[in-house]
Image (tube, helix red, strand yellow):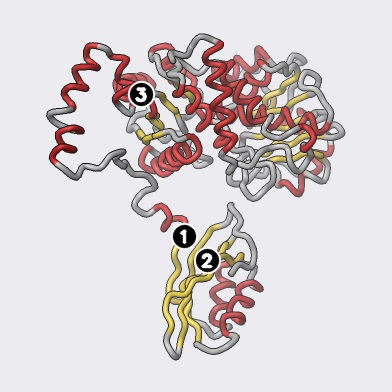
Amino acid sequence: MTNVSMPANYYRYIYQIRVQNKPGMLGRLLKAISEAEAGIGPVSLIDKTSETVTRNVWLAISSEEIRARVESAIKTAGSELIAIRDSVLLAHQGGKIQVVPRAPINTREDLATYYTPGVAEVCQAIEHNPSLVYEYTAKGNMVAVVTDGTAVLGLGDIGPEAGLPVMEGKAMLFKEFGGVDAFPICLNTKNPDEIVNIVKALSPGLGGINLEDISAPRCFEIEERLKQELDIPVFHDDQHGTAVVVFAALTNALAVVGKKLNEVKIVINGTGAAGIAIAKILMSGGAEHIVGCDTRGTIYNGRPEHMNSAKQWLAEHTNAERLQGSIFDALTNADVFIGVSGPRILHAPDIKVMNHDAIVFALANPIPEIEREEALQYARVVATGSSSDPNQINNVLCFPGLFRGALDVRARKINEEMKLAAVNAIASSIAPKDLHAEHFMPSALDKSVARRVAQAVADAARKTGVARK
């Protein structure tokens, strides 16, 4: 039974409640909970006697105030609250991934084939021809998801152990959407030299490296060094996965409003890994008018404070007019706002100063820079990173398919052409005749997108000479 959908950004709990075994008691209970403004999800039977019925009720609760009202409502409805469990924590109990053999071991012959003595023949074959490691091991389908836990989600530097649940989730998405085996590697060091050396030492057993949740500007150095020193794909998803999906979304959003990339003014708020990468890929696609902003305001050449090497690059290649001031100044007469920063920094009047048919991508998670409904007061096209909003901009549309395509052709690297191929594959997932303001991005759950991305990336790898197969 469901009253309302379970919002993705709410706290989700399982309430175990006992009610009297009388007609109408369940309806009375659910009505009371609904009036307390909680979202009601599935209801399941746990136990039943002649006197009582015990059920689990999944609830979406957005604040402690609502939680208190719910618990009061349960008592008022004549029911007994037995226990409260966090459904998200329960879902993660024991971890989210496991290693599963591809063949059973039931007989002595199986054991001799897959382990000793049979495996020695495979070892010797690879020793004489190292390229056979792709044929006779899992290397060609194995990606390491590597983090140091310094920039996890919007939580910041929470450490490698606390970052592990995210890396496990990433591994799940790799397998579910791309058929790629991935394993989390959480490193207890923030030293770029150590991270590079550890990843290099691990690389013989890997077909690719996905860097994740490593803080800027260290992430730029780490990725660049690994790309130069390894002959397998290295990809920092926070940078390039975000950039690819944003570019695909902007391609279709511009088609909806009838504007051209080289003509629009684009304001990017947030100049960490994602913001810099978005600027670079948009420029490679033809964008000419970009202004980057951080907490100190616009990025411009000659700005004396709060700069680093990545921001200096942005200053030298964007904001040709050297616009100075706050994010609010930058938005005046802008056509596009892309937020990869923090929650609720904008309100409707801030969007009002943008040009007609404005595009707003508010991608901070779990709370966007401006709520979708508020932005729509003045913007024509709005997208967020939330699964509860239409046109969700989610990296899962990119990385599983991108790595699938790179691994399929044993690519030595992931280059700009492969990323742009992924952009086009995602954008073209929706036919031009079907594009409109409420539908310009494919669903994050559409697994056919990964297949299209994989094919496009594989083709681009072959054309650019980085494919070995």
- Furthest toward the right, the residue is 356
Which residue does the image show at 61% across and 47% down from the upper left?
387
Q: Mark 1 points at which residue?
A: 87
Mark 2 closeness class: few <14, some 14–19, many ≥20 residues within 10 Å: many
User: x, y percentage for residue 27?
Assistant: 61, 80
Tag 3 secondary structure = helix
Distance from the alpha carbon under mark 3 to that under mark 1: 35 Å
Q: Name the residue under label 2.
A: 58
Relative to 329, 306 lies left or right:
left
Between marks 3 and 1 in the image, the one whose residue lies nearer the viewer: 1
Q: Which of marks 3 and 2 is nearer the N terminus?
A: 2
Circle 3/circle 1 CB separation < 8 Å: no
Distance from the alpha carbon under mark 2 to that under mark 1: 8 Å
Closest to the observer: 147 or 230? Answer: 230
Relative to 451, say whether 172 is above or below: below
For badge 2, the amino acid type reads Trp
Mark 1 closeness class: few <14, some 14–19, many ≥20 residues within 10 Å: some
Residue 276 in view of the camera: no
User: x, y percentage for residue 161?
Assistant: 36, 41
Relative to 281, say whether 12 is above or below: below
Task: Assign the C terminus to one quadrant of the image.
Answer: top left
Tag 1 secondary structure = helix
Residue 215 in view of the camera: yes
User: x, y percentage for residue 320?
Assistant: 74, 14
Which residue does the image show at 77% across and 15% down from the upper left?
321
For badge 1, the amino acid type reads Ser
Kindly identify which numbered label has been placed on residue 72.
none
For badge 3, the amino acid type reads Ile
Between marks 3 and 2 in the image, the one whose residue lies nearer the viewer: 2
Q: Mark 3 points at which residue?
A: 195
Q: Quadrant of residue 296?
A: top right
